[in-house]
Image (spheres, rainbow, N blue to C red):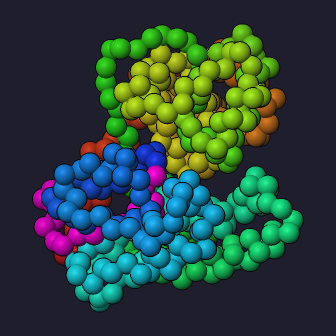
């Protein structure tokens, strides 16, 4: 399919890490020969900025605030205004990659088309408000202020959800949330999964968890479970504000790798016994990456995992097993059950192929061309 040759802008909420949403963004960028990139704040060390087809990079005025890259989440109530200030009137097409704000940008011209790829309606403003408030350990004095800000963000988010011409959801789970909160229909295009192949890996036989170490990922649950299974080893890949606390409670059978390159990550996955995911994910790209390496998954059985993992109770060709309660004892029970099952590497790889990068890019181009033709 031919690439569009229009004047194109790509908008992404913020570029301070490189994780699943940035993998999606990277593949969107590949669809165009030349484009301008917008984000609320960005870290120039982010590999996204190295792409040669980016003509110009625009950030918001929040970029000028000292230490913003570490504290941006505390300024969420300022971000809708920042997104709406971006000037898009010279563009024929905007593609936004949004899990928070960029779906609410102002087009500035009636001829500009806007396709929004939505990773999720903002979690902390909707179904995770209580988790967010409790995990951030807000003082009682400011809790009412924060709750008011969250309510205003919800009101803005409903209005913002009406602005795109077309919405793409990253899973059926997110599609349902878009319908529930915004009242909008959307199409599903699963995120791209790309594997870096290599032979430099060790059959370490440990379980692996890969994610940003933030509270809602529930890596603490995984650590507590493996603390009670001292004969089983666990490798945790990733960094984030939860890292010091997790290291403090972890026993000697748990190893923390920190940040890892894609090649290092896949080498770790290829030598694993299994992959563990304890959070309710909108999609869960790391669990698909594990399957692409032939590694079966233990996952919390809600959200996107229902679409990406073939549970042992539901098929003769399983690629994993679900646990249905976010408790360490229930997870331990499923780890023990997992070890008794003979998962086939070929089944895992076959299932992961449904989420190829080539399929993602082709389907995105179809939607872009249908919008702009």
> Left or right: 14 with respect to 71?
left
Q: Residue at coordinates 59% horizontally, 58% vertically from top-left?
A: 71
What residue appears at the point 46 percent right and 48 percent down from the top-left corner? Answer: 17
- For the point 53% across and 73% down, the residue is 79
Residue 297 shows in this picture: no
Judging depth in this view, the residue of 208 and 371 nearest the camera is: 208
Q: Indicate the quadrant containing the N terminus: top left, top right, bottom left or bottom right.
A: bottom left
Classify residue 243 as left or right of residue 117: right
Q: Position of residue 342 (x, y in %)?
A: 56, 15
- Name above or below for residue 308 compared with residue 148: above
Q: Percent position (x, y) of residue 286?
A: 49, 37
Magenta span of residues: 1-16
Total numbered labels: 0
**Quadrant the C terminus occupies:** bottom left
Q: In the rendered view, does 66 fall on the left or right side of 153?
A: left
Name, please, the residue furthest toward the right.
140
Query: Where does the image place residue 356, in percent across and percent down from the top left?
Result: 33, 41
Q: Is residue 171 visible?
A: yes
Classify 213 as above or below 123.
above
Say above or below: 6 vs 314: below
Q: Which residue is outermost to the front?
A: 66
The one of 47 and 337 positioned closer to us in this rendering:
47
Determine whether 142 is above or below 48 in the image: below
Queried whether the magenta region covers residue 19, the answer comes back as no
**Would residue 12 be counted in the magenta stretch?**
yes
In this picture, residue 244 sits left or right of residue 25:
right
- The residue lying furthest to the bottom in this view is 110
Q: Toward the viewer: 334 or 317?
A: 334
In percent of width and height, residue 199 lies at 33, 14
Residue at 40% over, 14% down: 201
């Amino acid at each position: 399919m031919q690439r569009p040759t229009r004047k194109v802008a790509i908008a992404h909420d913020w570029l301070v890490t490189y994780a699943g949403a940035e993998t999606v963004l990277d593949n969107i960028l590949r669809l165009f020969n030349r484009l301008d990139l917008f984000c609320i704040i960005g870290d120039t060390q982010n590999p996204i900025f190295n792409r040669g087809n980016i003509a110009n990079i625009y950030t918001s005025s929040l970029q000028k605030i000292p230490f913003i890259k570490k504290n941006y989440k505390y300024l969420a109530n300022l971000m809708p205004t920042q997104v709406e200030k971006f000037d898009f009137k010279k563009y024929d097409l905007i593609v936004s990659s949004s899990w928070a704000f960029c779906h609410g940008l102002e087009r500035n011209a009636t001829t500009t088309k806007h396709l929004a790829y939505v990773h999720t309606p903002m979690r902390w403003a909707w179904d995770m408000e209580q988790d967010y408030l409790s995990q951030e350990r807000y003082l009682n004095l400011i809790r009412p202020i924060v709750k008011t800000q969250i309510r205003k963000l919800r009101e803005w988010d409903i209005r913002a959800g009406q602005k795109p011409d077309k919405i793409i959801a990253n899973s059926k789970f997110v599609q349902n949330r878009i319908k529930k909160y915004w009242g909008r229909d959307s199409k599903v295009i699963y995120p791209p999964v790309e594997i870096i192949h290599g032979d430099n890996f060790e059959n370490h036989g440990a379980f692996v968890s890969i994610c940003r170490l933030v509270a809602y990922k529930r890596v603490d649950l995984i650590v507590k479970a493996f603390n009670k299974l001292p004969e089983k080893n666990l490798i945790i890949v990733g960094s984030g504000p939860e890292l010091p606390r997790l290291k403090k409670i972890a026993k000697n059978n748990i190893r923390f790798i920190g940040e890892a390159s894609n090649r290092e990550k896949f080498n770790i996955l290829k030598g694993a016994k299994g992959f563990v995911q304890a959070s309710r994910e909108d999609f869960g790209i790391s669990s698909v990456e594990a399957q692409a390496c032939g590694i079966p998954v233990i996952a919390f059985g809600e959200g996107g995992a229902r679409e990406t993992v073939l549970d042992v109770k539901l098929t003769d060709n399983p690629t994993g097993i679900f646990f249905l309660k976010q408790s360490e004892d229930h997870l331990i029970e499923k780890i023990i059950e997992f070890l008794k099952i003979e998962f086939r590497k070929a089944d895992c790889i076959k299932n992961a192929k449904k989420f190829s990068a080539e399929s993602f890019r082709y389907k995105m181009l179809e939607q872009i061309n249908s919008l702009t033709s």
